[in-house]
């Protein structure tokens, strides 16, 4: 199975103040890594549950560990990362995706590919690394 590598993900969201009442879809919303890198493979894995979107980037290079660490270090090649977004209303009433977490393995090592697979169900998030 081949995967299309994209620098950002185009995400369809319902257009209305209440998501469940509108049949109209907007295709002008996208999410992008807060620390984009050319070879990160952002969007390699994705999952959504309710208003939470999870995006894996298994070849992201930060040396951070845990939650919301330093994204700029690029010191651990292909250690991988996961980005968590919430669908929230903006000041103008437009809905948009807001990054709420940047996740790294607690023991990030080179070529771990954390984020190779992701899944979410309610408030349970699972991240795979081969």
Image (spheres, helix red, strand yellow):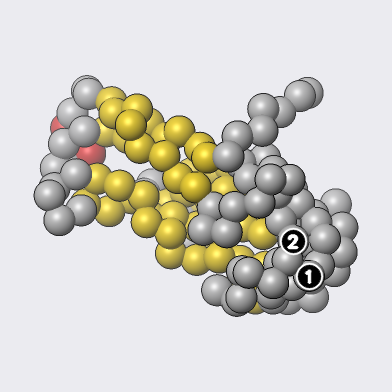
In this view of the protein, can residue 83 be seen by the observer? no
Counting from the top left corner in percent of width and height, residue 126 is at 64, 57
Regarding mark 2 in the picture, which secondary structure is present there? loop
Looking at the image, which is closer to me, 94 or 39? 39
Please give the label number shown on residue 75: 1
Residue 68 relative to residue 106: left or right? left
Q: Residues within 10 Å of mark 2 (few under 14, many from 20)?
A: many
Residue 22 relative to residue 96: left or right? left
Question: In the picture, which quadrant includes the N terminus?
Answer: top right
Inter-mark Cα distance, 2 to 1: 6 Å
Comes first in the chain, label 2 or label 1? 2
Look at the picture and state if 96 lies above or below 112: above
Looking at the image, which is closer to me, 20 or 92? 92
Label 2 sits on residue: 61
Residue at 60 percent of width and 34 percent of height: 6
Residue at 33 percent of width and 31 percent of height: 28
| Quarter where residue 61 is shown | bottom right
Check if mark 2's residue and mark 1's residue have beta carbons within 8 Å. Answer: yes
Counting from the top left corner in percent of width and height, residue 109 is at 85, 69
Residue at 36 percent of width and 50 percent of height: 97
Looking at the image, which is closer to me, 83 or 41? 41
Counting from the top left corner in percent of width and height, residue 115 is at 70, 53
């Amino acid at each position: 199975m081949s995967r299309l590598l994209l620098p950002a993900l185009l995400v369809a969201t319902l257009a209305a103040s209440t998501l469940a009442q509108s049949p109209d879809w907007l295709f002008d919303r996208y999410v992008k890594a807060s620390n984009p890198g050319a070879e990160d493979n952002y969007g390699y894995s994705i999952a959504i549950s309710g208003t939470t979107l999870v995006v894996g980037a298994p070849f992201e290079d930060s040396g951070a560990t845990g939650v919301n660490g330093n994204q700029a270090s690029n010191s651990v090649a292909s250690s991988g990362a996961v980005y968590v977004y919430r669908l929230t209303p903006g000041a103008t009433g437009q809905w948009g995706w807001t990054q709420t977490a940047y996740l790294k393995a607690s023991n990030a090592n080179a070529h771990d590919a954390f984020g190779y697979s992701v899944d979410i169900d309610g408030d349970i998030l699972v991240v795979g690394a081969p």
